[in-house]
Amino acid sequence: MIGKRLRDIRTSKQMTLKELAERTGFTASYISQIERELVDPSITSLRKFCVALDVKMYYFLEENATQPTVVRADKRQKLKLPESSVEYEFVSPMNIKSDINPKIEVIEILIEPKKWSSDNFFSHDADEIVYILEGRLMVATENAEELLNQGDSIYLFPNMPHKYYNPTDKYTKLLSIMTPPIY
């Protein structure tokens, strides 16, 4: 599904594979493999496509064309990429074909035991509060590390490079609350 949407938005903007490759730093061959659903892009790759194509992340993630006003727990959009230690479940509504334009985004995140959220620091142009629902979480920034327990929260400024580590033997569950939405 992500590959088809990537091709659809690229062609709707009358952009060639080569032009998208130049804007993202990826090869045209890699982008073609994604569009043909031969490989799955990482979250970092999707972010680069979003910037290059001027779309929100949820363009690639939404599955149906109806925008709910209530997001039922069993109907949440989920994202788990291959070889990732993180699972995202979108608590806030996601849909590009609606009149709703949320100003805030809430994501429930599960991080596997003894795993990092990513190898590299990531940042986004959004204010973020991370609230620990279950377990413990180390939040690493370029300048500090903070160990959070259940019930703790941390505020991250826009464009602050960060990543998460679950130091426990059980899954850690957290809420990420961001404004403006990045997905």
Image (tube, rainbow, N blue to C red):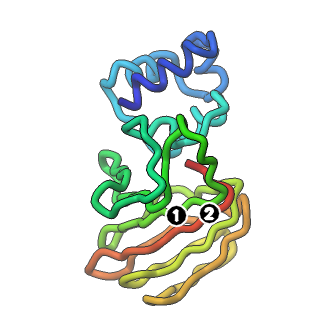
Between 54 and 121, which is closer to the camera in this rendering?
A: 54
Q: Where residue 106 is drawn, which disc sits there? A: 1
Q: Which residue is mark 2?
A: 178
Q: Name the amino acid type tagged 1.
A: Val
Q: Position of residue 26 (x, y in %)?
A: 55, 26
Judging depth in this view, the residue of 100 and 50 nearest the camera is 100
Residue 43's x, y, as percent? 48, 45
Give how far across and how far down residue 55 sits, in percent. Answer: 62, 34
* Labels 2 and 1 touching (C-beta < 8 A): yes
Residue sitting nearer the eye, 139 or 8: 8
Residue at 38% from the left image edge and 21% from the top image edge: 33
Residue 147 percent across, percent down from the top left: 51, 86
Q: Quadrant of residue 96?
A: top right
Q: Amino acid at mark 2?
A: Met
State the count of labels: 2
Horizontally, is 86 left or right of 149 in the view?
left
How far separated are the C-alphas under marks 2 and 1?
6 Å
Instruction: Judge left or right: residue 23 versus residue 130.
Output: right
Image quadrant holding the N terminus, namely: top left
Residue found at x 35% / y 18%: 36
The kind of secondary structure element at disc 1 is strand
Looking at the image, residue 90 sits to the left or right of residue 126; the answer is left
Which quadrant of the view contains residue 146? bottom right
Please report the residue visible at 61 percent of the width from the left and 73 percent of the height from the top: 129
Disc with the residue nearer the chain's start (2 vs 1): 1
Q: Is residue 145 above or below residue 102?
A: below
